[in-house]
Image: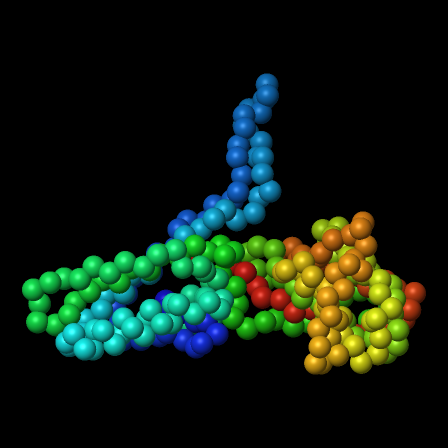
Amino acid sequence: MNIALVNDSGEFTLDGTEYKFVLARYKKRNKFVDRFSKSGVIAIGDGKVSRRTAELTIYKTAIDDVAYDEYVSLLYTFLADDSDLFIVDKDRVVRLGVFIDGVSIKAKHGTEKRVTDIRITFMCSDGLWETEEKVNTDSLVPQGIIQITNESYEKAYPIIKISTAGTNPDLAISNITNGKSIRVGTTAFTQFVDMFIDSINGRVYLSDGTNLVDVSYAVSNNSGFIDLDKGMNTLQYDSAYGGVDIEVIRRERFID
């Protein structure tokens, strides 16, 4: 495992530095209750990944106080950035979204060089690793089916980009595999405007390449957002207003 910290300001690399990384165990958000008059238990809960913590300890040796202060200053400046923070495994090209929980420094005194253990604790925003690069599936859909294979261990939450050749005020996309579906209706969806159905953040917006317009209000009350089960998923597009071009963009997700 070759760890680095990454945010919008860049990368804080640990190349050439000794460190230890520990990720808490994977656990489902369930409680278990004994089955009445039967053996075994039933699970109560939503089955999502429970909160998960991570800890990175950097064993830093500096040649003198100046070098040590410079290193710590760079680290604190990096961690102070308010943008999204990821722990990246550069060997597997996967990342883990995290929030900083705390930083502690334990210096080992009495040495000629500055020897310090820097411990950073994190709370994971999702609890699963995800691919750094997005996976895309493109399909020109006059009216019909898209097959998508999700190679994740868990569900994947896609962003679905839709382009139309004319005005399309009503469309629906369903995942036949798990029964999830979404219906969107807005006359603002026209040629040269792309629709994005963001299942990660629960939003629908339109883009002309320059401006974004939130149209989440246009989602039908009787529908929701699509996710992808592990393995093969069959998506179906339906509309009385002709075919569209669909791009399904997602990151695949893994436990460890």
Work out which quarter of the rendered image holds the N terminus and state it: bottom left
Q: Quadrant of residue 4?
A: bottom left
* Residue name at image x 54 percent, y 39 percent: 30
* Residue name at image x 58 percent, y 25 percent: 35
* Residue 60, above or below 27: below
* Residue name at image x 15 percent, y 70 percent: 114
Residue at the extreme top of the image, as rendered:
37
Q: How is the image coloured?
A: rainbow
* Horizontal arrangement in the rendering, residue 99 relative to residue 40 (left or right): left
Q: Quadrant of residue 111?
A: bottom left
Work out which quarter of the rendered image holds the C terminus and state it: bottom left
Residue 2 placement (x, y as % from top left) = 36, 70
* Residue name at image x 16 percent, y 74 percent: 65
Foreground pick, 33 / 176: 33
Residue 163 placement (x, y as % from top left) = 79, 75
Residue 130 placement (x, y as % from top left) = 52, 64
Foreground pick, 211 / 132: 211
Residue at the extreme right of the image, as rendered:
240
Q: How many marks?
A: 0
Foreground pick, 215 / 162: 215
- Residue 167 shows in this picture: yes
* Horizontal arrangement in the rendering, residue 34 relative to residue 104 (left or right): right
* Horizontal arrangement in the rendering, residue 61 relative to residue 246 (left or right): left
* Horizontal arrangement in the rendering, residue 122 relative to residue 200 (left or right): left
* Residue 67, above or below 96: below
Residue 121 placement (x, y as % from top left) = 35, 56
- Residue 231 shows in this picture: no
